Amino acid sequence: MVLSGILKYPAILEQYLQNFDLASVGTVSDMMPLHGENRIIVREGCKILFKLHRRETRHREGLFQLLQLIELADKHVTSKDLGWVLGPMINSAGRMNRTEVALNLLLEEDPQRAQSGAKELQKLNEERKERTKRNLFKVDGFLKRKKERTEKPVLFCYEPDFEPGVSGIVATRLVEEYKKPVLFITPDHGHAKGSIRAYGKENVLNLLKKAESIFLQFGGHKEAGGFSLDLEKIPELAKTIFEHADNWLEEEQKQTILEQTPSLISLRPEELNPKIFQELSIFEPFGHENPVPLYSIKNAKVYHTKPMTDGKHVRFRILGAPESIQCLVWNRGKDFLELLSKSESLDLWGSLEESTFRSKTSLQFVVNYFQESENY
């Protein structure tokens, strides 16, 4: 009834839809499932954000100024922009205990003050990145001193000099490096706060429930969780986690059917092109419970490999694929190159993504899984 009334008045509808910009950022950043009304919120929110970026609407000056500092494609804003760029920038203020910087920016209507506030938030985001680097450096030293921790089924990390605010990011990086579930804990205003991240399909909340009586608070979802506890209870938490880790992983594996990496469609290398990317873009916005379409390429002949960041990542090309398509493996570059040295061809699973750099947008094939081809 209310909606039908609003639809009769385009100006009111436009004002109503303008609020979808922040609603869409929050929906994606909080990893809400992208179906039903959430999908509508994010789809319409991306349209509003693109209009704001192009100055076709002037309803939120602070957000407009922030969008000017971000590399965006010249045709649209996507859910990936929200989840990987815009959301983390806004969230960095809270991580650095300066929430008011983000709040004031989103409420600001004066162009000069908004521009200044956007740059301040951008600076906070850079400081957040530096804090993450410092924590990774510290945890590297911690694990060198306590190498036995890396041999346990779950990696548990706490040191009094770890810095707060970025525990989830650090835990994710450690999962990528050690290929196991990770708990990363820091002191925070007289208590301890931590994050847990899954490596595979295990449900980390089921592990946290084993230590429920130790926490002040805990929560999250299947792949990621957060918690707080008294500092003096950290040894008790470590003991409980280590006691239950093996059985927990075994229980989780029983619940997971032998995993086969499914793909939406199997392609020949020459079919890896902008046309199929555009055809499947109708399923946007992508996100939690509506993942980016997964393509598979069987018996791929890989050439022209280029390791990056000391081999952590790698660029390469696939024989037969268009020259304009860059192929990438993030974080598992060394594993990829090692397997490639033993194999004539690989089976690849990945997604096509747009990448914008210096105002130029290109298409890249990001490989999520790979294995030696069964038939080559």
Image (cartoon, rainbow, N blue to C red):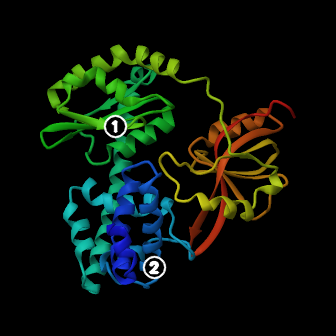
- State the image coordinates of residue 369 (x, y, percent, origin top left): 65, 39
Q: Secondary structure at mark 1?
A: strand
- State the image coordinates of residue 264 (x, y, percent, origin top left): 68, 45
- Residue farthest toward the front in the current orientation of the protein: 1
Please indicate whether residue 158 sits to the left or right of residue 49 in the image.
left
Q: Which residue is under mark 1?
A: 225
Q: Quadrant of residue 245?
A: top left
| Vertical comparison of 284 with 210: above or below | below
Q: Which residue is under mark 2?
A: 51
Front in this rendered view, residue 206 or 317: 206
Q: Residue at x 27, y 48 (%)?
A: 165
Front in this rendered view, residue 86 or 342: 86
Please indicate whether residue 297 sits to the left or right of residue 249 in the image.
right
Q: Quadrant of residue 182?
A: top left
Image quarter hosting the N terminus:
bottom left
Front in this rendered view, residue 68 or 35: 35
Q: Residue at x 76, y 56 (%)?
A: 272
Amino acid at dot 1: Gly
Amino acid at dot 2: Lys
Q: Quadrant of residue 173?
A: top left
Alpha carbon of mark 2 to alpha carbon of mark 1: how far?
A: 35 Å
Q: Secondary structure at mark 2?
A: helix
- State the image coordinates of residue 82 (x, y, percent, origin top left): 44, 61
